[in-house]
Amino acid sequence: MKTQTKADIMLLMVTLFWGASYLLIDYSLEELDPFNINALRFITAFLAAFILAGKRLLPVNTVTLKYAALLGFILMIVYIGATFGVKYTSLSNAGFLCALTVVVTPVLGFFFKKQRPDKKLSAAVLLALAGIGFLTLNESLKPAPGDILCILCAVAYAVHLLVTETAVLNERVNAFQLGVYQLAFSGVYQLIVSVLAEKPHLPCSGKVWFSILTLSIFCTGFSFVVQTIAQKYTSASHAGVIFSLEPVFAALVAFFIAGEILAARGYFGAILLLISLFIMELDIRKIAGYLRDVIKKLISSPS
């Protein structure tokens, strides 16, 4: 098996974990408050990473720690949106709306980095807006509070990606350490908020313990590390297309395990969102050229 194929399979596993995470968050909310969940999730993920790769995490310089502190704060906002969003909307809606980072990132790049949007981005944004409307608006044309929070999650994660891009270009920043220490900072921030605003405690049931540990070890620690390693051996376009499948996995998990069914309007909106994600990640011209060549060969080949 080729190295790139192995990397793509690993990224597919990461995407599956992320798609399943919405259901695990939903289970955790049965006993724990949102900040309590995220504090346990990120602190446990950091401790697991430190145990497995402690030698690579020390020593660490102040520049890496400063960026990790900033990214940890942004990551807290990301998961506030995701966790509270799951609490107040459907699992399927959460999966599709949180995946809008793919579309939001280049839009923010235009505003903050003066990167001119191309026709592909314009088409993707229009489709995404239409998809959001069909997926979230009810008869009174009002989205659920959870839908708005999931969109906040997508915007915050787009900011996280742009700040990370800036950070890793700094020669003094260790990318691996940055990825791990941001988990620690995010966990500590959310633990502080949980202590001040909630009554934090450990899970009581095996179901919630399983959910928290799976979120921590597989959906956070494992996924962040594997993503970093796998992307060294596969293209950004491959990774982007694979990550675009996250809402599909989220919807499948919601349907088969949670028994969640969307209205016809919601499925239509979800399809529009998926199309917008694939438009952003696929090279349409190359695909069109490839299909054109295939058709020419079929026409010219003797019957």
Image (tube, rainbow, N blue to C red):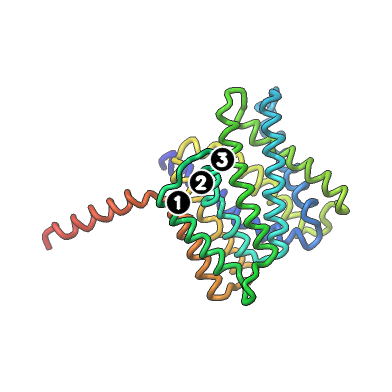
Helix, strand or loop status at disc 1: helix
Contact, mark 1 vs mark 2 (Cβ under 8 Å): yes
Helix, strand or loop status at disc 3: helix
Helix, strand or loop status at disc 2: helix
Measured as percent of width and height from the top left, residue 166 is found at 58, 33
Q: Is residue 60 visible?
A: no
Q: CA distance from mark 1 to mark 3?
A: 16 Å
Three-letter amino acid code at disc 3? Phe
Residue closer to the observer: 277 or 122: 122
Three-letter amino acid code at disc 1? Leu
Residue 106 is marked as: 2
Residue that protrudes farthest toward the left in the picture: 302
Residue closer to the observer: 62 or 228: 62
Say which label, 3 or 2, has the lower sequence index.
2
Say which label, 1 or 3, has the lower sequence index.
3
Measured as percent of width and height from the top left, residue 244 is found at 51, 53
With 112 as the anchor, is 234 left or right in this view? Answer: left
Residue marked by disc 3: 112
Measured as percent of width and height from the top left, residue 40 is found at 77, 47
Residue 29 is marked as: none
Q: CA distance from mark 3 to mark 2?
A: 10 Å
Q: Is residue 95 visible?
A: yes
Kindly identify the residue that appears in the image at 60 percent across and 55 percent down. Answer: 98
